[in-house]
């Protein structure tokens, strides 16, 4: 089945130690998104790629970076994780075509910062 | 992007119909209304989307009045497995737009036996 895959599902990192979360998709969608979701809060969009074009949200901290080497893969890099960055990180994809679109979300990576 | 307002929580019983209303007073002409469902420790899942009047699929119905300032998600005969957070989103989904989603607070639906 076509899907959005996130690895790992659970990630533990130390305060200040860089960490990379990965997302892959078999849907061949041209848009990929990264969201941060903290406990009992709604998902918050960090940035998205439309093909190779990177779109950063205005309030996304510089500590968060992203890479999209090809259509299928997208990475979230947290350069110096703080305790406040502990959250679920969700990757999503969508196909820009026509009026109706929907975003397909992966299962998320739960990041713990110690 | 239009701001949405939903009830924070709702309770229901198995077999009942549940209606969750979302207010979006500043909806723009090009905006569509979309609802997502999220179970704990999972990513959100698309439920339904509409522009005006009524839309129905195998999961839910979406009612949108003529002024489009609100919408109601209707879940027929809910079961325990429908316990989840339901998000109402409003945004421009015309071709060429990357469809940025801004999630509001969502409504936590608790279905009881």
Image (tube, coloured by chain):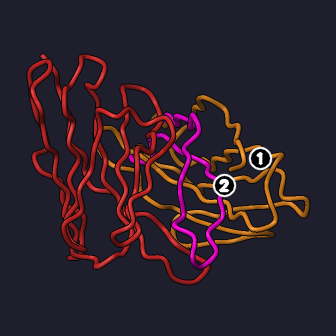
Circles 1 and 2: CB atoms closer than 8 Å:
yes
Res. B90 mark: 2
Which percent across, then down, holds residue A52? 33, 69
Q: Are discs 1 and 2 both within one chain? A: yes
Provide residue B101's location: percent of width, then percent of height: 53, 53
Residue depicted at 84% across the width and 51% down the height? B69
The segment highlighted magenta reads B81-110
The residue located at (48%, 67%) in the rendering is: A102
Residue B24's tag is 1
C-alpha distance separating marks 1 and 2: 8 Å
> Which residue is at the front of the view, B8 or A102?
A102
Q: Which chain is orange?
A: B
Chain shown in red: A
Quarter of the figure with residue B61: bottom right
Q: Is residue B89 magenta?
A: yes
Q: Is residue A35 above or below residue A53?
A: above
Seen from the viewer's position, the closer of residues A69 and B40 is: A69
């Amino acid at each position: 089945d076509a899907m959005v895959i996130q690895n790992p599902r659970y990630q533990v990192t130390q305060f200040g130690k860089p960490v990379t979360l990965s997302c892959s998709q078999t849907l061949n969608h041209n848009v990929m998104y990264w969201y941060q979701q903290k406990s009992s809060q709604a998902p918050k969009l960090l940035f998205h790629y439309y093909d190779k074009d990177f779109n950063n949200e205005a309030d996304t901290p510089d500590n968060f970076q992203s890479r999209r080497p090809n259509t299928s893969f997208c990475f979230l890099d947290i350069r110096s994780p703080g305790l406040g960055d502990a959250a679920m990180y969700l990757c999503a994809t969508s196909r820009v075509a026509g009026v109706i679109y929907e975003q397909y979300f992966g299962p998320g990576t739960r990041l713990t910062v110690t | 992007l239009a701001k949405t307002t939903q009830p924070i929580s709702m309770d229901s019983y198995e077999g009942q119909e549940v209606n969750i209303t979302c207010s979006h007073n500043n909806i723009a002409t090009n905006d569509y209304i979309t609802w997502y469902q999220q179970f704990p420790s999972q990513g959100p899942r698309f439920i339904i989307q509409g522009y005006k009047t009524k839309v129905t699929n195998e999961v839910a119905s979406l009612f949108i009045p003529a002024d489009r300032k609100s919408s109601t998600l209707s879940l027929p005969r809910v079961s325990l497995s429908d316990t989840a957070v339901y998000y109402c989103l409003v945004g421009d989904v015309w071709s060429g737009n990357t469809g940025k989603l801004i999630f509001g607070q969502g409504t936590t639906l608790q279905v009881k036996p």
